[in-house]
Image (cartoon, rainbow, N blue to C red):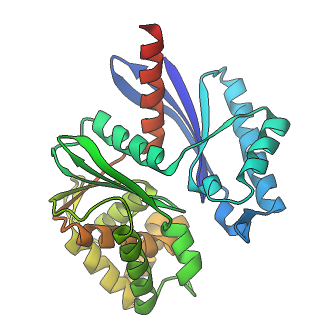
């Protein structure tokens, strides 16, 4: 069975096709386009230029899907649209112009989808821990025990909106990093996730995958496992705060498109790890997209019973 999703994020919009066979999900096509929707926000509304950018990309992806003869498509959006004052108007316009229905993931649903993606991947090796999904416009946090979510929350700070809110140049200064850290701590403390002392953090999203690649490239992380440590994050942040030109150059070689959001995202993840006394950070290559597909598959199974 073929499934497809279009994920509208704060920075990128992604089209992915999956094949589900014998209980396993395999990516067969993956495309992304940088939209930078957050940069088109004015007074917490997406301006006309941003709306036209969104429409253009969705029109292009819809054409691709028609050419591929894919009917089973779920278009969804997260904080990129969810937190906008004109979200209803945008969804209505997309429906009128392109005949596309956009499913707006609520924050806790998004957290649950990310959790399900990691759990169904077979890579969740601990019974208790924290899962976090740091996106461009929000960060989802799940405390789980017996591999079952117990507490879920979403805080409205991500790698991209924290950059625009706090950072004055390309890389944040020490004081700007501290401002991001304090914002994250304040929001977690006010959230529905209590403070737990756990060993394992499962990190989801492009930010943590980019950080892992950078850590490997600059040899702070020398093995090829999916595990990194808070000490590695601290070392990377320390060197970048010193304006280490060697590190800066290597980041440009590995992830040039994420150069401005890498450190804000790093600070967010490091702060979450610090708050819950994390010892190991497991970098997942699964995302909320796989979680959405697993949810669709489960619903299909229930409908056929």
Rendered residue at 38%/88% (across/down):
241
Rendered residue at 42%/41% (across/down):
113
Judge by depth and name the residue closer to the eye, 60 or 47: 47
Q: How many marks?
A: 0
Q: Position of residue 32 (x, y in %)?
A: 59, 47
Q: In the shown orientation, is residue 57 left or right of residue 208?
A: right
Q: In the shown orientation, is residue 249 left or right of residue 273?
A: right
Q: Quadrant of residue 30?
A: top right
Rendered residue at 75%/56% (across/down):
86
Residue 246 seen in this snapshot? yes
Q: Position of residue 75 (x, y in %)?
A: 62, 37
72 versus 94 height, above or below: above
Q: Quadrant of residue 23?
A: top left
Q: Quadrant of residue 186?
A: bottom left
Q: Position of residue 216 (x, y in %)?
A: 29, 64
Residue 244 seen in this snapshot? no
Q: In the shown orientation, is residue 198 left or right of residue 22?
A: left
């Amino acid at each position: 069975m073929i499934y497809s999703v279009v994920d509208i994020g704060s920075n990128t919009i992604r089209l992915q096709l999956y094949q589900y066979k014998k209980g396993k999900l395999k990516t067969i096509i993956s495309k992304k386009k940088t939209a930078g929707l957050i940069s088109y926000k004015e007074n917490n509304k997406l301006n006309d230029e941003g709306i036209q950018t969104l429409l253009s990309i969705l029109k292009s992806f819809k054409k691709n899907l028609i050419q591929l003869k894919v009917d089973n498509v779920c278009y969804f959006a997260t904080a990129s649209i969810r937190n906008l004052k004109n979200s209803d108007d945008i969804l209505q316009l997309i429906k009128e112009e392109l005949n596309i229905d956009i499913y707006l993931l609520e924050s806790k649903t998004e957290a649950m989808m990310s959790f399900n993606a990691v759990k169904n991947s077979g890579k969740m090796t601990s019974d208790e821990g924290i899962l976090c999904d740091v996106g461009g416009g929000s960060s989802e946090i799940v405390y789980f025990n017996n591999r079952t979510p117990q507490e879920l929350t979403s805080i409205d700070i991500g790698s991209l909106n924290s950059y625009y809110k706090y950072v004055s140049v390309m890389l944040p200064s020490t004081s700007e990093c501290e401002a991001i850290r304090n914002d994250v701590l304040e929001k977690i403390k006010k959230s529905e996730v209590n403070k737990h002392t756990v060993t394992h953090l499962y990190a989801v999203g492009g930010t943590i995958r980019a950080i892992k690649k950078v850590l490997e490239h600059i040899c702070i992380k020398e093995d090829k496992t999916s595990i990194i440590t808070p000490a590695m994050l601290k070392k990377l942040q320390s060197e970048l705060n010193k304006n280490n030109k060697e590190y800066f150059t290597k980041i440009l070689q590995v992830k040039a498109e994420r150069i401005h959001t890498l450190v804000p995202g790093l600070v967010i993840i490091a702060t979450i790890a610090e708050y819950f006394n994390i010892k190991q950070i497991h970098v997942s290559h699964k995302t909320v997209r796989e979680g959405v597909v697993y949810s669709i598959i489960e619903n299909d199974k229930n409908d056929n019973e």
